[in-house]
Image (spheres, grey):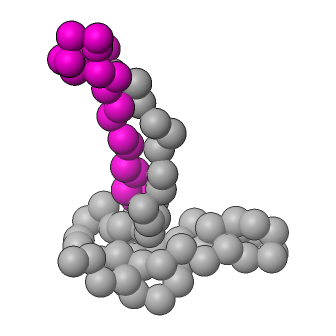
Amino acid sequence: MKYKKPVCECGGELQTTAAYCCDIIYNINSNGKKAKKPKYSTDTQDGEHLECKSCDNAYFIEIDDKSRIIRGEEYDII
């Protein structure tokens, strides 16, 4: 069966949205001050879902048997 891109209830195109967090780390210099150049920790993913480009609807991401993205149940964005 040919893959069909998931669409919103309104018929609009869906896109994936992910929230990422990053820690910014500063060394402490020998004079007790914060270093000017930070180091960044690796990003950690806080969540991913599908959002409609046309309206405010959002959905959980589901994966089919061929590892393709399909629309899941409706997702409440807080």
Residue 78: x and y, percent? 21, 77
User: Within the magenta stretch, is there residue 68?
Assistant: no
**Extreme-bottom residue of the structure:** 73
- At which x and y percent is residue 60? 48, 78
Name the residue located 40 percent from the left edge and 51 percent from the top edge. 20
Query: Is residue 42 toward the left or the right of residue 40 in the image?
Result: right
State which quarter of the image contains the N terminus.
Answer: bottom right
Q: Is residue 40 above or below residue 50?
A: above
Q: Is residue 45 left or right of residue 10?
A: right
Q: Is residue 32 above or below residue 68?
A: above
- Predominant secondary structure, magenta span: loop
- The image quadrant of residue 53 is bottom left
Residue 18 seen:
yes
Magenta stretch holds residue 34: yes
In-front residue for pair 9/30: 30
Measuring from the top left, give residue 8's x and y in whole percent: 40, 76
Total numbered labels: 0
Residue ID at (42%, 62%): 46
**Residue for point 41% across, 30% down:** 40
Is residue 67 shown above or below 77?
above
Q: Nearer the viewer, residue 49 or 20?
A: 20
Magenta segment boundaries in residue numbering: 17-37
